[in-house]
Amino acid sequence: MDCVARREEFPALAELFVDSFGGTKEFALSVLENFSGEGNVFTARQDGVCTALLCAVPVTLLGRSGAYYYGLTTRPDQRGNGVMTALMDAVGQELARRGAAFAALIPASERLFGFYAARGFEKAFSKRVLHRQIRNNLWAQAEFDTVTAKGLQTLRRTFAPEAMELNAAGYTAVLTDLYSLGVTSVCTDHGYGLFFQKGNELRFVELFAESDRAAVAMLEAARQKTGAENAVLELGEGQTLFLGEGSPRDYGMIRFFGQPFDVRDAYMRLMLDDE
């Protein structure tokens, strides 16, 4: 099955992406051209027409090369005919041939966990969601909105070596999207975080620090900047910050191409999935 999408098919695939997920065609083309990259976009065809889309974004995890599946969708008139199953099988074979050790994805709904489990994926990458009040500390200091794509890559390698890593283009796409949506970055010598503000609440979509104390210091600095007194933290289940707080929730899945490896402490977030 010839499933690698050709460059001239990208406009039609971008339209399929927008029809399925919304947004603009410009964003969809950026997903195909930058976040995924040519050679990593796959499609099924019928009579020369693209009927399905699967982006296999290059990533690494714990020193192993793999792919993050994003934008999986099938034309409405072709759903229920096994098109996506066949495409996933073909993509898996191609990735294994290239030397990939795994593929990971984030189901868009609870129902899809079962769909992907039937196609070789298993649950992984749980997250904890917890709520904290932020103490007023007039002396709390941090840097804000200074994190670049290259900087985020460096910060993750420093504070989250167990995190799934994108390539440079992938980090650029993610951070560009986050800043366009209004994210604020906070950074000290002891950690970093990315958050959105909604009224009196800060939603941290990523937070890493050397200790609880270092994390609290960033929260307090964020309060001084925003005035918000409450925070919602989304942490990987394996993170050591604020142990015992929050309840684990199923989040991502993985499929191994060959010998499985331990991903209990692995982390996967900020993949253009739910920002």
Image (tube, grey):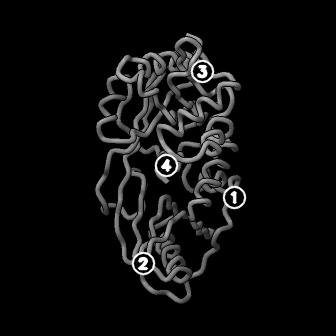
Q: Toward which corner of the image does residue 184 lie, by quadrant? A: bottom right
Mark with earlier residue (3, 4): 3
Mark with earlier residue (1, 2): 1
What is the x, y in percent for residue 82? Answer: 38, 17
The residue pinned by badge 4 equals: 269
Q: Residue furthest bottom?
A: 138
Label 4: how many residues lie within 10 Å, few (<14), some (14-19) or many (20+)? many
The residue depicted at 47 percent of the width and 34 percent of the height is 104
What is the x, y in percent for residue 256? Answer: 45, 25
Residues at marks 3 and 1 touching, judged by CB atoms closer than 8 Å? no
Q: Where 207 falls versus 77 (above or below)?
A: below
Mark with earlier residue (4, 2): 2
The residue pinned by badge 2 equals: 200
Residue 99, numbered label: 3
Residues at marks 1 and 4 touching, judged by CB atoms closer than 8 Å? no
Residues at marks 4 and 2 touching, judged by CB atoms closer than 8 Å? no
Q: Secondary structure at mark 1?
A: loop
Distance in Å between CA atoms under marks 3 and 1: 30 Å
Mark with earlier residue (2, 3): 3
Mark with earlier residue (1, 4): 1
The residue depicted at 67 percent of the width and 49 percent of the height is 172
